[in-house]
């Protein structure tokens, strides 16, 4: 009998040490008594006893950790024994009629057992991870264990005094460990700790630097240097990860226990995180079409989709098919997302909304899975609308090149799935796609074709009438001194080039300013301040300029003002100031550009003259120039090259057009070196002609230049009426300047003084002007 028992014990130990078989019962049914039987058995030789002793020690350590954590050993062993019986062969699993009566109790016990097993395995996993990390990285947050020193402390307090016994270099973490002799004295004190650490920037050259320092200090016998790589720690980390994987696989194979990383986890990741607006769950309380000011044509096109979903029989009777999708295009802040919100509220059908960036994650295949899930949810709710904001995140042009793994990228897979769902074999009617982007140039052509996004709705910057409507819409929500229509026309005139978001920001800044100065109502003065703040930043009167510098800035800005005043095709003058701004401008002259899409050769030439007015005024007055005209010269150069290279306005170069954007995409110029030299020559000629014309205007009106500059030095800010009183009306009329007396009178009554600002947002160096070929009209002198 004793021999049989020992054979059984040997067989049990082999099963325990096999690894994969050491999963449930072998690990937990081995107790201290069994270990004692093994160790006392004559069938176990000395090497095996050593291995078994090590296993016993590890076993004791794990159970001690679990007991300190409040783990119930008896409950867990009972559970494991029960699981072993359940996982045995079928001949031990005969049906018992009493099982049906015990089924409810058994289910509750299974739940408790499952939680206990998960707790045990997760605790064991965390224990191993913490142990490996603590071995890999020294903890510098514990000064009593690890102490860091600088290079100078090491050199003069340790190395020079012969206290260093050994240096250990760890290249993987760029740290050097300094080991001192027993009883070492540092900074005149005996230290108990022998180990210090030192961070090294260039670890590969540390030993050369050390030997050079020893040579300078006269140390003949160098300190021994050893290198320790992180291979051992990395190996321990890999082993730990492998053990964690084994534990999780054991957990997933256990009947009744579900792995924490089960398929349900990946299913959850593959679900589309859309926002659902369903009229069945409650009426829409969001944005309505009446809340969207302007955008008349865009609203009309989008409302056709809404009307089709509400009354499809009207279109089907005539055989018409609604477009599959619409793409909202335009600059940022013009109302694309706002219009989509209105569609969601007004359509009276389910509206599923997602951002383009929410599709793609680090895990491959999630983007395509989320696209499929989004359209599956839409099919369940058809008819409905799917809206993807910033679709350029997943709709970029496919490169056609394979990546390092030999497969297409995650974004391309997501795009391919989107194309299939929008117009593929399983496409279902009743689903309308809406999307918005401000980068239509990078979208894939397959996404833009009819059958997917049939309509491309352009939402551009608002004109003066639309700006007036937008101002009235936003001013309705502000406590004003007078009705919104009293301010809207003037504000629309002052803000050319503003988007809907800019206008909303102006109204909010006005309300904030009124609250800051403790007013009960928002007045015209607050609105003027808000426009000025958005255009050029806040005034920076604390920035002190020397009298000479202030005089140069005054004549510079007076030159811009006078040239724009005297020429025919320039825009209406609005304001000139030499008050510094937070955007680094020492002064600027502002004009109100007209809402025009076409510009003649004469207009562009006189814009160049106006921009050069400051540089020429400095040269004529002081016989020298400063760096203040840098911004002006950049604008002049852009206009000159645009005329020659893009607009075909040079008779020498001819009727050719080379787009700057196209050249950037190609990476090379589509013309020869000879043509490039000719373009440069013509651009220089245009700038020289503009400079000569500007010089003639200022020489002829030098007395007016000095008059404007002197008053600007006194008042710091001059508006249209001030300049008109000084030098008379413009020779070519007021250039469609609207009446502003009532509005400015309101500002005067609010402030008690003549207004110091009457600003507008001229089209300056912005992306919008570059795309539309417009030249900048806001002259800025920068420090």
Image (cartoon, rainbow, N blue to C red):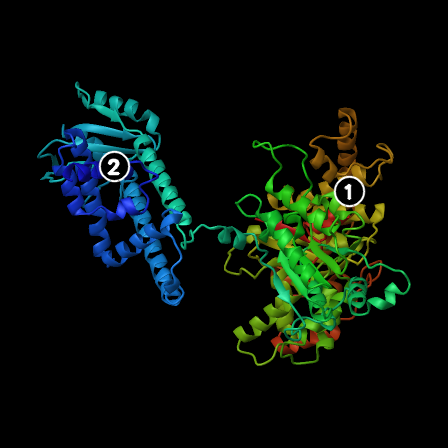
In the picture as drawn, the residue positioned furthest to the top comes out as 220
418 left or right, relative to 731: left
Label 2 packing within 10 angstroms: few (<14), some (14-19), many (20+): few
Q: Is mark 1 on a helix, strand or loop?
A: helix
Q: Position of residue 38 (x, y in %)?
A: 16, 39
Residue appearing at x 29%, y 47% in the figure: 25
The mark that comes first in sequence, 1 or 2, is 2
- Residue 309 location, x and y as percent? 78, 66
Query: What is the quadrant of residue 312 in the picture?
Result: bottom right
What residue is shown at x 25% (from left), y 22% (from top)?
211
Q: Quadrant of the N terminus?
A: top left
Asked if 213 appears above or below 452 in the picture, the reply is above
The spot of residue 141 in percent (x, y) is 26, 47
Along the line of sight, the residue nearer the viewer: 698 or 577: 577
State the CA–CA distance, disc 1 to disc 2.
Answer: 101 Å
Q: Can residue 654 be seen in this view?
A: yes
- The residue to which callout 1 is attached is 690
Give the vertical position of 491 relative to 458 (above or below): below
**Total numbered badges shown on the rendered structure:** 2
Badge 2 element: helix
Q: Which of marks 1 and 2 is in front?
A: 2
Residues 539 and 316: in front is 316
Q: Crowding near pointer 1: few (<14 within 10 Å), some, many (20+)?
A: many
Residue 577 seen in render: no
- Left or right of residue 194: residue 88: right
Residue at the image position 74 percent from the left and 59 percent from the top: 432
Q: Mark 2 points at which residue?
A: 11
- The percent coordinates of residue 716 (x first, y second) are 61, 61
Residue 93 is labelled as none
Residue furthest to the right in view is 318
């Amino acid at each position: 009998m004793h021999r049989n028992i020992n054979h059984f014990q040997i067989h049990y130990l082999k099963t325990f040490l096999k690894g994969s078989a050491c999963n449930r019962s072998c690990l937990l049914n081995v107790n201290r008594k069994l270990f004692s039987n093994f160790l006392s058995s004559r069938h176990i030789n000395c090497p095996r006893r050593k291995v078994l002793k090590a296993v016993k020690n590890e076993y004791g350590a794990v159970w001690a950790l679990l007991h300190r954590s409040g783990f119930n050993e008896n409950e867990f062993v009972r559970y494991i024994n029960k699981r072993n019986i359940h996982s045995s062969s079928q001949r031990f699993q005969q049906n018992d009629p009493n099982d049906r009566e015990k089924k409810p109790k058994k289910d509750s016990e299974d739940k408790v057992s499952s939680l206990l097993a998960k707790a045990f395995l997760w605790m064991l996993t965390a224990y191993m991870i913490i142990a490996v990390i603590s071995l890999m990285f020294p903890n510098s947050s514990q000064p009593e264990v690890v102490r860091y020193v600088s290079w100078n402390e090491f050199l003069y307090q340790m190395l020079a005094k012969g206290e260093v016994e050994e240096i250990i270099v760890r290249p993987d973490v760029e740290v050097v460990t300094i080991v001192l002799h027993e009883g070492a004295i540092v900074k005149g004190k005996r230290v108990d700790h022998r180990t210090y650490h030192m961070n090294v920037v260039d670890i590969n050259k540390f030993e050369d630097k050390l030997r050079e320092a020893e040579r300078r200090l006269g140390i003949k016998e160098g300190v021994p240097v050893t290198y320790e790589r992180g291979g051992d720690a990395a190996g321990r980390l890999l082993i730990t990860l492998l053990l964690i994987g084994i534990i999780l696989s054991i957990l997933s194979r256990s009947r009744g226990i579900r792995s924490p990383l089960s398929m349900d986890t990946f299913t959850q990741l593959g679900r589309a995180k859309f926002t659902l607006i369903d009229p069945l769950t409650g009426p829409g309380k969001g944005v309505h079409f009446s809340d969207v000011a302007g955008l008349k044509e865009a609203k009309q096109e989008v409302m056709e989709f809404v009307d089709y979903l509400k009354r499809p029989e009207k279109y089907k009777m005539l055989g018409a098919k609604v477009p599959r999708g619409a793409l909202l295009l335009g600059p940022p802040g013009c109302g694309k997302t706002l219009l989509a919100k209105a569609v969601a509220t007004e359509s009276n059908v389910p509206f599923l909304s997602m951002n383009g960036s929410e599709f793609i994650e680090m895990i491959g295949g999630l983007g395509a899975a989320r696209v499929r899930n989004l359209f599956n949810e839409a099919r369940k709710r058809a008819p409905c609308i799917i809206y993807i904001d910033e679709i350029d995140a997943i709709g970029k042009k496919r490169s056609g090149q394979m990546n390092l793994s030999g497969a297409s990228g995650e974004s391309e897979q997501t795009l391919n799935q989107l194309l299939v769902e929008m117009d593929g074999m399983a496409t279902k009617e009743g689903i309308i796609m809406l999307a918005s982007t401000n980068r239509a140039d990078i979208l894939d052509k397959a996404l833009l074709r009819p059958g997917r996004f049939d309509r491309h709705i352009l939402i551009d910057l608002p004109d003066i009438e639309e700006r007036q409507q937008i101002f009235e819409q936003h001013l309705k929500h502000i406590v004003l001194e007078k009705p919104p229509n009293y301010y809207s026309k003037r504000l629309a005139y002052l803000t050319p080039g503003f988007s809907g978001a800019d206008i909303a920001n102006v109204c909010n800044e006005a309300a904030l300013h009124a609250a800051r100065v403790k007013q009960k109502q928002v007045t015209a003065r607050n609105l003027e301040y808000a426009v000025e703040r958005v255009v050029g930043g806040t005034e920076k009167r604390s920035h002190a300029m020397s009298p000479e510098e202030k005089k140069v800035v005054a004549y510079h800005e007076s030159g811009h003002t006078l040239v724009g005043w005297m020429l025919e095709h320039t825009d209406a003058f609005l304001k000139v100031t030499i008050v510094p701004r937070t955007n680094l401008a020492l002064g600027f002259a502002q004009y109100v550009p007209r809402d025009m899409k076409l510009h003649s050769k004469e207009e562009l030439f006189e814009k160049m003259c106006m921009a050069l007015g400051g540089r020429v005024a400095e040269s004529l007055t002081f016989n020298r120039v400063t760096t203040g005209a840098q911004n002006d010269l950049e604008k002049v150069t852009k206009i000159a090259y645009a005329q020659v290279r893009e607009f075909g306005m040079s008779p020498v170069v001819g009727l050719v057009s080379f787009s700057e954007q196209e050249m950037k995409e190609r990476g090379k110029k589509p013309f020869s070196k000879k043509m490039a030299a000719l373009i440069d020559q013509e651009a220089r000629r245009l700038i020289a002609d503009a400079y000569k014309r500007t010089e003639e205007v200022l020489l002829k009106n030098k007395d007016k230049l000095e008059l404007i500059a002197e008053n600007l030095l006194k008042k710091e800010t001059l508006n249209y009426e001030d300049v008109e009183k000084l030098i008379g009306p413009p020779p070519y009329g007021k250039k469609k300047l609207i009446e502003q007396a009532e509005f400015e009178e309101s500002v005067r009554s609010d402030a008690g003084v003549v207004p110091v600002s009457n600003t507008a947002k001229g089209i300056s160096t912005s992306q919008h002007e570059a795309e539309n070929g417009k030249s900048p009209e806001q002259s800025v002198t920068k420090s």
